[in-house]
Image (spheres, rainbow, N blue to C red):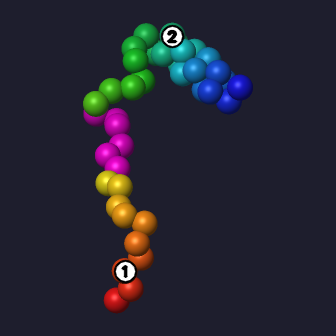
Amino acid sequence: MGGNVAKVAKDDIEEKLGESIISKNNNLSYQYLEDNLIEN
């Protein structure tokens, strides 16, 4: 259900702006690390 709410909100914003709100310029780059904790 939450995914549908997010899609409706995204579609509504894009319709009002007249452009996509998802682009390469606003993506987040994540770096995934191992689950091991290294203490100093």
For the point 37% across and 80% down, the residue is: 38
Q: Residue furthest right?
A: 1
Residue 9 in sight from this viewpoint: no
Magenta span: helix, strand or loop, mainly?
loop
Q: Which labelled disc corresponds to residue 38?
A: 1
Q: Toward which corner of the image does residue 23 lie, by quadrant?
A: top left
Between the residue at mark 1 and the residue at mark 2, the CA separation in whole angstroms equals 47 Å
Q: Toward which corner of the image does residue 8 lie, by quadrant?
A: top right
Closer to us: mark 1 or mark 2? Answer: 1
What residue is disc 2 on?
A: 15
For the point 28% across and 30% down, the residue is: 24
- In the picture, the quarter occupied by the C terminus is bottom left
Three-letter code for the amino acid on which mark 1 is drawn: Ile
Q: Is residue 16 above or below residue 38?
A: above
Q: Which labelled disc corresponds to residue 17?
A: none
Q: Secondary structure at mark 1?
A: loop
Residue 23 vs residue 2, the one in the foreground: 2
Q: Position of residue 34 (x, y in %)?
A: 37, 64
User: Is 31 displayed left or right of 21 in the figure?
Assistant: left
Q: Is residue 17 magenta?
A: no
The residue range painted magenta reads 25-30
Q: Residue furthest bottom?
A: 40
